[in-house]
Amino acid sequence: MRLLHIALGVVAAAPLAAQLPARAPSAALTGVVFDSTALAPLAGAVVQAVMVGPEAASTGARAFSVQADANGRFHFDSLPKGRFAFGFQHDALNVFGLESPVAGVEWTGEKNIALNLILPSSSETRAQLCVVNGSVSNAGVLGGYATDGRTGAVPAGTRVTIRWFELGLSKGKLTSLPHEIGSMVSAEGRYLVCDVPVGAPVELTVTSPGYRDVSDEVAIEAERIVVRHDFRLVSASLNHGHASITGKAATKDGALVPGGVVAIRSLQCEVPIEKGEFVFSNIPGGTWTLDIRALGFEPQSLTMTAPDSVDTVFRVEMQRRAQTLDAVTVVGRASREVKILDAVRTRIKANHGTYFGPGNDYLEHALFPADVARAAAGFRYVGYDRVVARGCEHTTSMSGVRKGVVIYVDGLRQIGGLEEAANMIPMKQVLAMEAYADVLNAPPEWRTYDACAVIAIWTKPLY
């Protein structure tokens, strides 16, 4: 941790606080350390008071420090009289390379004083961090630490990549275009990415040789355009450890989710939800993505860090699925197109997948099936001919067969995968698509030994 270096008055930076002789306190100086970028107090910040007035020359102890509590509050009650400069140290400063704000106080010890130490606003922080072509970027900023979850070391070759999908013009046509930006993690374990879209979710992925990939969906809001997101990476060789995660799944009104499953795909580990509770025991400490599925509720994926030798406890709020209206009986002969769509909706309703049908923006404007599949829950875009499912990159079956994303076209297995589908099927001919990031949530007929995820493409009838 760095000392607060100040050159006000007659004294330069002093050593960290020495203990003053005990005496009855007459007044107190209190305050709050607040992070304007995170809109939250800075718990654990080390607040430093450095004497900078002429009294410093005759006072044995010239620097003092206290630690802020969980609410960012700090308290000095034994300061000698004199002029002080106050600042603080915290990872929130270090991760973005910021200097501590400094406040000067004339302390007489006769009356209580309240002092707040506040990080610059998001817009001010962005102006310091991101300058593009001589001007300040108007987009969002993502930064944080990515280190080994067990040792705290910085793995060589660690990279943070941010991907998103937005509508744009391609060959004169409005279509969905992939975008990607990234940053290598520094020797200190920090990363910083500017020009991140504001107001729309982006996929943030951390990759490092010899470590498990970690992905999360992050949304930068207009009110909070600088976001910190830390990752604790787990070695690919570790399958067990001393961390645990205890969760409670409930609705907004407090009703417990009666049953379901929670999975950590990259660890190939799944536990049941029983009366709203689930527990992962003896897992390696680090950052994990949890996929939560329960009948009658919207699927959820969330990323959380479980420190080693600690039981991490959290609560997740589940959203009930929108109630489907009763079917309306229509007298007449249904077309083949209607029958296909009805069958797809029935499968999606009975299982846990993502549906793309007529009128969907992704389906209407995509150039290739992969452009659509990347918008499905749990999938990540790699190229026009490939997508991967979360936790599906390094999976093998019990017989040693490597698993992957299996493609079906009109119900038939597509041996060439998405590449062959992209070359064979014009998107204007695609009627609907369904995607299942976890083969256990796919229709039973598609749960083959070599599949860990399934994408089904349905074409329009030729008549």
Image: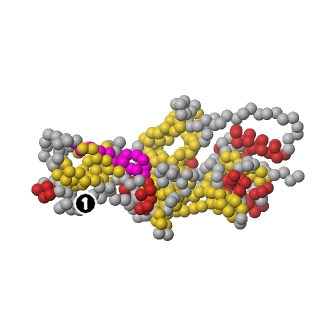
Task: Give the extent of the magenta segment.
Answer: 28-44
Tell me residue 184's x, y (percent).
Answer: 48, 64
Q: Is residue 210 shown to the viewer in this render?
A: no
Q: Residue placed at 71% from the left, 65% from the top?
A: 172
What is the three-letter code of the residue carrying label 1?
A: Ile
Q: Regarding mark 1 in the picture, which secondary structure is present there?
A: loop
Tell me residue 300's x, y (percent).
Answer: 57, 43
Of residues 371 and 169, the one drawn nearer to the viewer in this rendering: 169
Left or right: residue 8 versus residue 216 is left
Of residues 382 and 362, the one drawn nearer to the viewer in this rendering: 362
Q: Which residue is mark 1?
A: 6
Residue 38 in the magenta stretch? The answer is yes
Tell me residue 73's x, y (percent).
Answer: 31, 43
Residue 127 in the magenta stretch? The answer is no
Left or right: residue 346 versus residue 183 is right
Left or right: residue 53 versus residue 321 is left
